[in-house]
Amino acid sequence: MADRVVPWFDAAIGVCLILGLLTRPAAILGAIFLASICAAQWPLAPGAAPIYNQAVELLALLVLAAVGAGRFLGLDYLFGGLCSICCPPKKTQTSS
């Protein structure tokens, strides 16, 4: 079952990151997936394959999630702007 699900998961995460749609959740899910790949190929185990590429991608996804990518460009930005137009935040009244 994993052989059928993982390619679709990878494609969905990639499409979300390219389009800028749900950028933070996509980056976090991608980082979790790559962390599981890195854990499966532990560098100190005998005969383990190098994980340099996966580790770099993992760190890049964590940076995307931490920086808040998607707030300035992409579909997240577009949907956020549309949401602020149609559903402005409610103002609270202060009592004096």
Image (tube, helix red, strand yellow):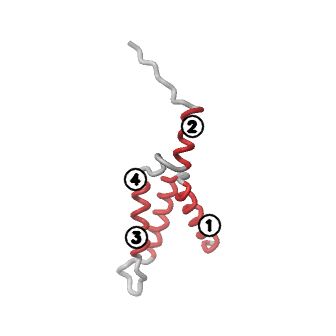
- Return the x and y of residue 12 as percentages of the image width and height: 59, 61
Label 1 Cα crowd, 10 Å radius (few <14 / some 14-19 / many 20+):
few
Asked if residue 48 is positioned above or below residue 24 in the image, the reply reads: below
Residue in the image at 54% along x and 39% along y = 81
Q: Are marks 4 and 3 in contact (CB under 8 Å)?
A: no
Q: Are marks 4 and 2 in contact (CB under 8 Å)?
A: no
Q: Secondary structure at mark 4?
A: helix
Question: What residue type is disc 4 on?
Answer: Ala
Q: Quadrant of residue 96?
A: top left
Q: Earlier in the sequence, mark 4 or mark 2?
A: 4
Residue in the image at 49% along x and 66% along y = 33
Residue in the image at 45% along x and 19% along y = 93
Q: Secondary structure at mark 3?
A: helix
Label 3 Cα crowd, 10 Å radius (few <14 / some 14-19 / many 20+):
some
Q: Which residue is mark 3?
A: 55
Q: Which residue is mark 2?
A: 83
Residue occupying the far top of the picture: 96
- Return the x and y of residue 95 as percentages of the image width and height: 41, 15
Q: Which residue is mark 4?
A: 66
Q: Earlier in the sequence, mark 1 or mark 4?
A: 1
Label 4 Cα crowd, 10 Å radius (few <14 / some 14-19 / many 20+):
few
Q: Which residue is mark 1?
A: 8
Question: What residue type is disc 2 on?
Answer: Cys
Question: What residue type is disc 1 on?
Answer: Trp
Q: Earlier in the sequence, mark 4 or mark 3?
A: 3
